[in-house]
Image (spheres, rainbow, N blue to C red):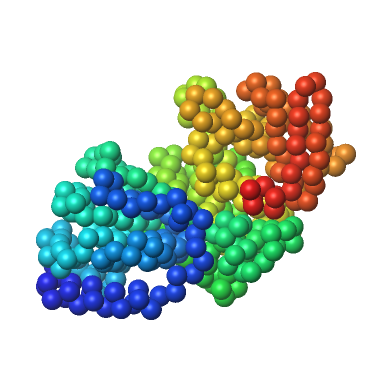
Amino acid sequence: MLLKSEIEKAVTQQALLYQKKVEGIERGVLPKIRLGKTHILVITGVRRCGKSTLMLQLSRKEKKNFSIFNFEDPRVFNFDTDDFSKLTEVLDASDTLFLDEIQNVTGWEVFVRHLHDLKKVICITGSNASLLSSELSTRLTGRNLQLELFPFSFAEYCRFTGANRDGVSFQDYLHRGGFPDYLSTDNKEVPQQLFKDIIYRDIIVRHGVRNHKALIDIGLYLISNVAKEYSLNRLRKAFALGSVNTVSEYIQWLEDSYVLFSLPRFSWSAKSIAINPRKVYTIDTGFARANSLSFSKDSGRLFENAVYLQLRRNHKDLYYFRDKGECDFVVREGSSVSQVLQVCSEVNQDNMKREVDGLREAMRFFKLKEGLIITLDQEDELKADGEIVRLLPAWKWFSA
């Protein structure tokens, strides 16, 4: 519990800090965001991807009487449920409220609901998807708009670094990724420390994990094996864990913290989706390289990971397809599939049949006349049997 004077001091000092903070480049999602009294804006994403900076950009764009309160401020470490009433009094004069990392305090959703009922304009952020979504679905159903923020896209990376949008800068983006802090320092300890912070602060402490080593080892193993299939049972055996449920929990917590994403194999059957192996991807290619030794010579899987992230920025319902061959990505919108995509650094005589046949198999399964192969620098068009397979350089596709 805190004194009201302590909360007032924290609010004042945080305001001074935000006034000095540099806005950085405008995030691509900014023009699409509209704050209002009818809905609470909820921004989620991995730590250090720029959520606080986006809030700052929003606050300056709105130009209204606002307050920003960061619940991870060490000065309010002991903030608990009873302190919300004091915070409400302190922030009463503000029409617009930006509440950063609010999921750290139990009962936050009741507080936000109260502010919403007072007709405040509210934006909240959090780095744990599960904690936010579970509470939003109970207390704030129909009252919130959710936005996921990722590290820089390729277009944002080019604006941040001043690079041209071309094949050379895309290769650089593939290796460095999109975390602003890492791009500013090129110090691999930055993403390495980020991994440790997420593991300890967002998972071990929050969930009371005892077997720290197994959690860390599984996280690093999956980061090192992006674009590959995994199974819970194989992981259980490999890391000598007693239960598949333990492995499942670890992976779910890593996903909730945006370290990892699991891509299911496509099926019209929910049961088949549940039991089939999934492919794993991670939040950022620079983050993957810094926390693994497996990408020193193999950039193909990083390339596929980057494509996954770009798709994930715009689509929630993604799968991979496998029958006789394999297609890397299937984009489902509602009850139908809108796109099928293959990722291949270079299409040549050695791999063309495999890549094209896998894509065409998916096209025929979903009754699509066009499919796309994303390459590093090839642009072409293959036509056969009334079907079109387009080859497009990554830097053009990412810039679209």
Q: Residue at x 26, y 45 (%)?
A: 38
Task: List the single residue furthest toward the front.
Answer: 63
Residue 128: tell me if it is visible: no
Q: Is residue 361 left or right of residue 316?
A: right
On the image, which quarter does residue 59 sit in? Answer: bottom left
Task: List the single residue furthest toward the right.
Answer: 349
Q: Residue at x 26, y 55 (%)?
A: 121
* Residue 167 on image: x %, y %: 74, 57
Frontmost residue, 299 versus 210: 299
Frontmost residue, 288 versus 207: 288
Residue 255: tell me if it is visible: yes
Q: Is residue 183 left or right of residue 143?
A: right
Q: Is residue 146 left or right of residue 329?
A: left
On the image, which quarter does residue 173 sit in? Answer: bottom right
* Residue 239 on image: x %, y %: 51, 49
Q: Quadrant of the N terminus?
A: bottom left
On the image, which quarter does residue 30 sit in? Answer: bottom left
Relative vertical location of residue 373 with respect to residue 62 in this rendering, above or below: above
Q: Residue at x 64, y 29 (%)?
A: 322
* Residue 130 on image: x %, y %: 35, 46
Relative vertical location of residue 266 with respect to residue 224 in this rendering, above or below: above
Q: For the image shown, how many numbered marks are present on the structure?
A: 0
Q: Is residue 165 left or right of residue 265?
A: right
Frontmost residue, 124 versus 62: 62
* Residue 379 on image: x %, y %: 79, 44
